Amino acid sequence: MAMSFTLSRYIGRMFLVRFGIVMGGLLFLLFIGDFVETLRQYASREIITATSAFGLSLLKLPNLAEKALPLAVLIGAMWTFSTLNRQKELVVTRASGVSAWQFLAPAVVIALVAGVFVTMFYNPISSMMFSRYSQLEAQWLRGQTSQISVSSEGLWLIQSFNGNRSILTALRINDSDSGSLSLEDVTIVSFQGSSGFDSHIYAESAGLGDGVWTLTNAWITPELGEPLFREAFILPTTLTRDQIRESFAPPETLSVWELPQFIAQAEEAGLSAARHKVHWYSLLATPFLFLAMVLIAASFSLRTARLTGFVGLTAAAAGTGFLLFFIADVTAAMGQTGVLPAPLAAWAPTIVALLFGTTVLLHLEDG
């Protein structure tokens, strides 16, 4: 027997309302927690006021919300199905010949559509705001004056030292496991304070040491004068290996549309893009993760009439959700270190959740 449109709309609206309430509560808690933590950590810095901390937390909130959305889907779906079950509405619905798969359909469709919307439209806004947050946080809270990016021409780096600024480009990066990091085909344009151009340097390679770049076979062209050749030339820097390896364009600052191009450019420049690959595949899995959360919620909520206590089942479902998030963190770490392929590392938690929810529902419905 087909389920009526009125019943589908009723269940769908109930799920949307409860999902919205849960998400609103989570957003409030996340914002307050991050705002208080920002004030606590940086209360000694005069540049950080309550207003600036409030602004930083607002910029970070969409990113935090993106991470909390699967949990909101899980709790919202549990709330919806448990309410229907306790009020015997599902009993009446099933007695009329409607299967569990049919009355789950409205929530499933909403979850899939919400996942697609989050991936395609919400994520670009979230990544843009988080990118701005990262810039301000680095400037205000950590005092970083260096910026690193990767383009089709290789690595671009802007660094400041004692009021002077340098723009460095390199076609390739050699980043060895032993700890050494060097650049090839390096071009550096230096500016002296606010007076403008100082010199142009081309070098075959540049090795990063403690507070210096060691340039090899460098041609130095000052603003006034003839080019000079140096087999070795020292250029001061405030950059560290960790900044270059880890701090360039965090995955959360790039949208789902920008990540493929960035990954290709980073790998062409010799940088590892494992973090960005895992993040990109995780974004693509978002609609199916939302679907899995609905199935897990249903697998627990539809049994409240038979098992002991709604509170216990709610705790069990929440524990299952947190376990999945823990598995996602572990597999993501394994993907970032190369232990697992990036697609498998990103999709494994979603696949496990889908299999778990589907198996339990098949057992309940078809016995």
Image (spheres, rainbow, N blue to C red):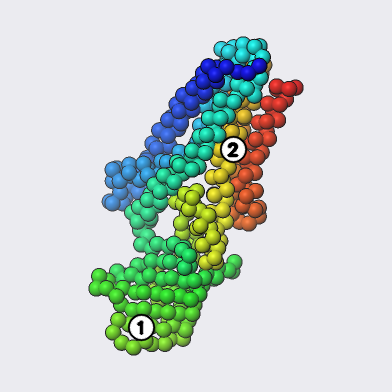
Q: Using the rendered view, name the quadrant where residue 351 is placed.
A: top right
Q: Earlier in the sequence, mark 2 or mark 1?
A: 1
Tell me if residue 344 can be seen: yes
Point out residue 10 in the picture as x, y percentages from the top left corner: 51, 18
As helix, strand or loop, the secondary structure at mark 2 comes to: helix
**Front-most of residues 333 and 196:** 196
In the picture as drawn, the residue positioned furthest to the left comes out as 195
Residue 46 appears left or right of 305? left
Point out residue 305 in the picture as x, y percentages from the top left corner: 64, 15
Point out residue 221 in the picture as x, y percentages from the top left corner: 36, 83
As helix, strand or loop, the secondary structure at mark 1 comes to: strand
In the picture as drawn, the residue positioned furthest to the right comes out as 367
Instruction: Residue at 48% x, 39% y: name it.
Output: 118
Q: Give the amino acid type for the residue marked by disc 2 in the picture.
A: Phe
Number of other residues with Cα within 10 Å of mark 2, as a class: few under 14, some 14 to 19, many 20 or more: many
- Residue 301 in the image: above or below residue 260: above
Q: Using the rendered view, name the quadrant where residue 347 is placed.
A: top right
Q: Give the amino acid type for the residue marked by disc 1 in the picture.
A: Thr
Q: Name the residue under label 1.
A: 221
Tell me if residue 91 can be seen: no
